[in-house]
Amino acid sequence: MEIPVRRSRARTTTFAARPRRGEEPDLYENTTTRERWLGAICYVPFLVFVAIFAGGRTPFVSRHCRQGFALLLAEAVGLSFIWIIDGTLGRVPLIGFLVVILLRLVFFLVVLVVSVLGFVKAMFGEEWRIPYLDELADRVPFE
């Protein structure tokens, strides 16, 4: 991964960032800015389709597209689950209301944190595997 350093308007110097001791080197060192943006928008729920249908698929973009699509599927399943709980247990006067509010809060906070982490990791050109969704993401047939 090269980090550009701007010294003046006329000249830009780049140097390779070395991995820290005990870390593996980055597999996607030569990712372009376009690839990083395409990888990052995969973590915004419905913008994953923009990255899927955009041409020029690289292993970096494919990996983030698969993970973004798996996250979108997990969000759809989670919302369906919350709607079912809201329609059944949510009818109980006080306890049902509190349980549904707590479920929604936890679900949306987890989705927000995972989406922001994926977005940031993709913008920095890093590979990141979403815990518990990694196996589902490997089964998504995008190449």
Image: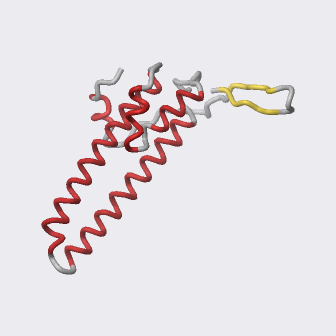
The residue lying furthest to the bottom in this view is 94
Picture layout, residue 31 above or below residue 76: above
Q: Which of 28 and 62 is in front in this view?
A: 62
Q: Is 82 positioned to the left or the right of 13 in the image?
A: left
x and y percentages locating residue 53 in the rendered image: 39, 26
Q: Residue at x 28, y 42 (%)?
A: 73
Picture layout, residue 25 above or below residue 114: above
Q: Which colour scheme is used?
A: secondary structure
The residue lying furthest to the left in this view is 88
Q: Residue at x 53, y 34 (%)?
A: 37
Q: Is 134 positioned to the left or the right of 11 in the image?
A: left
Q: Which residue is drawn at 42% across and 48% down?
A: 114
x and y percentages locating residue 134 in the rendered image: 33, 36
The mark total stands at: 0
Q: Is 2 positioned to the left or the right of 99 in the image?
A: right
x and y percentages locating residue 76 in the rendered image: 26, 47
Q: Nearer the viewer, residue 24 or 30?
A: 30
Q: Residue 16 falls in which quadrant of the image?
A: top right
Picture layout, residue 12 above or below residue 131: above
x and y percentages locating residue 19 in the rendered image: 61, 31
Q: Residue 74 falls in which quadrant of the image?
A: top left
Q: Is 1 positioned to the left or the right of 98 in the image?
A: right
- Image quadrant occupied by the C terminus: top left
Q: Which residue is drawn at 31% across and 38% down?
A: 70
- Image quadrant occupied by the N terminus: top right
